[in-house]
Amino acid sequence: LVTDDVFPFGRAKARITARDGQVREFDCAVADTDETRARGMVGRGFDGFEAMLFAYEEPVQHSFHMNGVPVQLYIAWFAEDGTIVDHLSMFVTDPAHYRPRAFYKWALELPMTEKIDMSWLDAARLEVEN
């Protein structure tokens, strides 16, 4: 993954294949260190990227929050084999911590827009291309 001092996140393509075979690709900022995962979307927009991908070396079940995040988000969690674990909407004004139903290796955050119908994520599979 490519990083620099000004933009500490890596870059990658996330490809999601839905149950019906439809494929969607997203240019992602990648948070794959403790520092960048903690920073995430806090105080920032997508900086020209379509999504933010949180990557872990081993499966985890950490929660996510919206404290300091300026945009509403969809989040989808994926297991080590790329299968969907869970997905939901996260709201700026909600103080909750969001946790998936099971362990995951990847979490993908997308901006919440009217254009995205998240039901296509049911039974989806993720592939990441560096």
Image (cartoon, grey):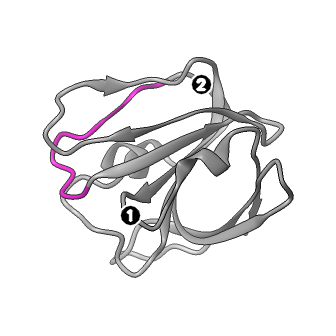
Amino acid type of disc 1?
A: Glu
Q: Position of residue 58 (x, y in %)?
A: 69, 30
* Count of all numbered marks drawn on residues in the image: 2
Amino acid type of disc 2?
A: Val
Which residue matches tag 1? Answer: 114
- Residue at 77 percent across and 53 percent down: it is 18
- Image marks 2 and 1: residues in contact by CB distance under 8 Å: no
The tag earlier along the polypeptide, 2 or 1, is: 2
In this rendering, would 108 be left or right of 47? right
Single out the residue that lies furthest toward the top.
101
Q: Position of residue 94 (x, y in %)?
A: 18, 33
**Above or below: residue 27 compared with residue 117:** below
Q: Position of residue 67 (x, y in %)?
A: 18, 40
In this rendering, would 83 be left or right of 66? right
Say what secondary structure mark 1 lies in. Answer: loop
- Residue at 78 percent across and 38 percent down: it is 83
**Above or below: residue 98 compared with residue 115:** above
Magenta span: helix, strand or loop, mainly? loop
Which residue matches tag 2? Answer: 60
The part of the image, by quadrant, that contains residue 79 is: top right
Per the rendered image, the range of residues in magenta is 62-71
The part of the image, by quadrant, that contains residue 85 is: top right
| Residue 76 shows in this picture | yes
- Residue at 62 percent across and 18 percent down: it is 102
Report, in whole angstroms, how far the alpha carbon at label 2 lies from the one at label 1: 30 Å
- Residue at 15 percent across and 47 percent down: it is 68
**Quadrant including the C terminus:** bottom right
